[in-house]
Amino acid sequence: MEELTSTVFARRQGARPRIFSGMQPTGEMHLGNYMGALVNWVRLAESGDYEPVYCIVDYHAITMPYDRDQMQERIFNMAVVMLASGLSGDNCTLFVQSHVPEHTELAWVLSSMTMMGRLQNMTQFKDKSARLEEKNEGINAGLFTYPILQAADILLYKGEFVPVGEDQSQHLELSREVARRFNASFGPVFPEPRTLHTQATRILGLDGQSKMSKSLNNHIAVLESPESVTQKLTRQAMSDPARKRLSDPGDPDICYVYGLHRIFSPAADLPRIAQQCREAQRGCFHCKKELADNVNALMEPVRQRAQDLSRRPDDVWDILLSGAARARDMARQTMEEVRSVMGLVRK
């Protein structure tokens, strides 16, 4: 296990390294979210090597237009999928961001440690701003300061490692800079969080071109019915461009569908599937149908557990509220230390 090289932060004696990660409740979780993040969250939680703190970041979700009547349902549904996938109140601290007010308190403190020019250069801000401008919608200040709240999320729990994808690496670097600036100004409070490199699986959308996204209608939801999964994969998934006719040989090395087979199909079946593609032994439809069967087989236990959890909403909320209580204990300790070193507490 990699150790921090920074000398400004001393981990609690005997404690495991703490990791933090969050996910927005912006809609139904799809296979891109599941394979790209959630599978790793579960693996890290079950490893016993870390102390995982996982958060449903609803405050981040309000920086873009949303339906307030759906927010609680989205939070609940995300929690259900997380728990059905293997997270629990025993192997991690799982909670909702807005249930711990210290997130926004620390974000305000860290805003005085963050330069505006740095925020203006954030790629996600530029991308989201461009989308809003295309719709003639205003750009709110929350979207601009989003990375500060993200830094606060991590630093509030003194997160040493953060399992993130490439699209979040710029935000994590900002978190490191903010921690470094705070420590230099007031004393050694925060670790400089590091990327935790894991075997995250990136899945493109059904068009084979773009990131899987509900807004692009190129996604498969984790809890989607087997019939819908089969229909989407057989009808919408991008076919091998080399196969114009049934008799044309394909190239599994560049085929979108075969790329999904690598993720969802048994490893022992891959040589056969690749050979059938190269030698045109069967058409793309049957190859997609086999893929759909394997996706459904892998996700069926998650669907079944999710159905059971959905029938017990009080149990789901109890886990989230218990997680929030644990998170508040950690957050209060951090903020007491922050206020003290900043001279905001009478001595």
Image (tube, rainbow, N blue to C red):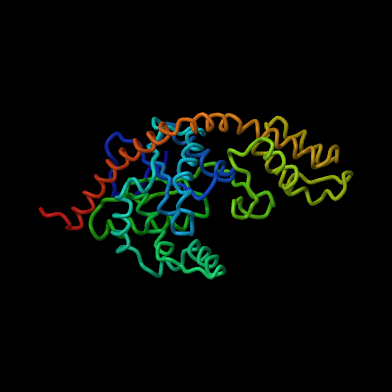
Place of residue 101 in the rendered image (x, y in percent of width and height, measured from the top left): 30, 50
- Identify the residue at horizontal 52%, vertical 55% (top origin): 167
The residue lying toward the viewer, choosing from 150 and 84, is: 84
Question: In this picture, is 80 found above or below 255?
Answer: above
- Identify the residue at horizontal 62%, vertical 32% (top origin): 298
The residue lying toward the viewer, choosing from 165 and 14, is: 165
Answer with the quarter of the image where residue 261 lies. Answer: top right
The residue lying toward the viewer, choosing from 41 and 47, is: 41
How many circles with numbers are drawn on the protein? Answer: 0
Answer with the quarter of the image where residue 234 lies. Answer: top right
Place of residue 195 in the rendered image (x, y in percent of width and height, measured from the top left): 45, 48
In the image: residue 57, left or right of residue 215: left
Answer with the quarter of the image where residue 31 lies. Answer: top right
The residue lying toward the viewer, choosing from 83 and 49, is: 83
Quarter of the image with the N terminus in it? top left
In the image: residue 24, left or right of residue 335: right
In the image: residue 290, left or right of residue 202: right
Q: Residue furthest left?
A: 347
Place of residue 182 in the rendered image (x, y in percent of width and height, measured from the top left): 28, 58
Place of residue 150 in the rendered image (x, y in percent of width and height, measured from the top left): 40, 54
Question: In this picture, is 152 found above or below 260?
Answer: below
Q: Residue furthest front?
A: 69
- Identify the residue at horizontal 81%, vertical 45% (top origin): 250
Q: Residue furthest right?
A: 247
